[in-house]
Image (cartoon, rainbow, N blue to C red):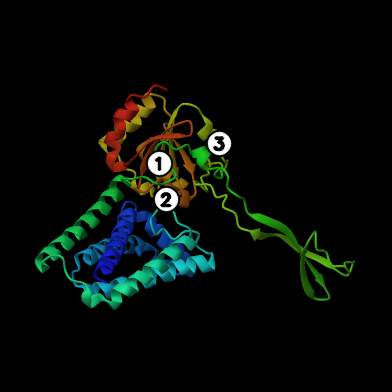
Amino acid sequence: MKLFLAVVRTIVGVLFIFSGLVKADDPLGLSYKMQEFFEVWNIHWLDHLTLAFSMLMIVFEIVAGVALLLGWRAKLFSWLLLLLIIFFTFLTGYAYLSGKVRECGCFGDCIPLTAGQSFAKDLALLVLILFLFAVRSRIKPVLLPAGSVAVLALATVLSFAFQWYVLVHLPVVDCLPYRVGNNIPEKMKAPPGSVPDSTVITMIYDKGGKKFEFDASHFPKDFDDSYHFVSRYDKLIRQGNAVPAIKDFVLITGGGTDTTQAVLETRGYKLFEFVKDPANIHTSREYAMLFATAKAKQIPYFFITGDYDAMLSRLVQYGDTANATVLKCDATAIKTAARADPVLYLLKGGNILGKWSSADYRKALPAIAELHN
């Protein structure tokens, strides 16, 4: 029993720490996943709190895992872990059974799990934690109380500090489809070997005030002029997995023209600056030098934003309208591409060569200064 308890403690503790660390590399990703659940449940008033919820949940996961390994306050943390895994199991179970959320973000974007895989994982963890809860009185501390408190305090501080760092400087391990080295047009295609959704055209007819649905292969034997056509739709028969890594990345000009392919297929270097809130564009020394270097080297500079008018007004304010192009893009696509605000991309054709948050624009300068278009 003692050996089995130690093994279960280690498995559960390490899993919680690992899960927390993976999500800590991209707390905004978990925040957006929370917003997805809130949208399904129609509780949008919590959207502005999701980042705080995300950071606190991540810290709690890590600290709870460390506390379990240390055996500190075992009775308290066995209760907390049980409540947490019940909550997680409810979320993943809801996502799996309802089909309204495709992925749960349990291990972030680095280890994508389907809703069904996440649910199975949480059910297994629930069984292990129920065992730990049942034998919680047998869990003995590894360190003296002062030592355990010091380790937990350090884990808490480092967890918050790491999340602050990636929020300012972008994820340390970039698992997003827009990571350096990827080709955007390629990532906009369905993965090789994927299976598209299987659908059948279904028609709705009215006969004597009753609605009848059938496809072209199953017309009623008594079909005649007494059936009156109402509508048709594509009925899903089998859900496929032909989902591209990059979705909804469409670049629209001020005149409403889709220029995505024209921009991405243009040879040579180009700079994309993804801007969520145009008010965050500032005139720092590094930014001015960056903009001037791009202009001197005749490297096209595109501001990509969800708020076209505000971005254009911002450029008019700074007198930069002649040196850059503003394009409109879906806000969700920008959230995925830019985990900070703003974020600068260096591309050649459709290939991503570099990306920097505004806090690291000084690092972008040497890379751009060396370019020869």
At label 2, counting other C-alpha atoms closer than 10 Å, the crowd grade (few under 14, some 14-19, many 20 or more) is: some
Q: Is residue 51 visible?
A: yes
Left or right side of 61 for 95: right
Image: 353 above or below 254: above
Label 2, label 3: how many angstroms apart (C-alpha)?
20 Å
CB-based contact (under 8 Å), mark 1 and mark 3: no
User: Mark 2 — residue?
Assistant: 335
The amino acid beneath tag 2 is: Lys
What is the total number of numbered labels drawn onto the structure image? Answer: 3
Give the Cα distance between marks 1 and 3.
Answer: 19 Å
Q: Which residue is mark 3?
A: 261
Quadrant containing the N terminus in the rendered view: bottom left
Closer mark to the observer between disc 1 and disc 2: 1
Q: Earlier in the sequence, mark 1 or mark 2?
A: 1
Is the residue 201 above or below the residue 341 in the image? below
Find numbered disc 1 in the image and state the secondary structure of the residue it sits on: loop
At 35% from the left edge and 47% from the top edge, which residue is drawn?
A: 341
Sooner in the amino-acid sequence: mark 2 or mark 3: 3
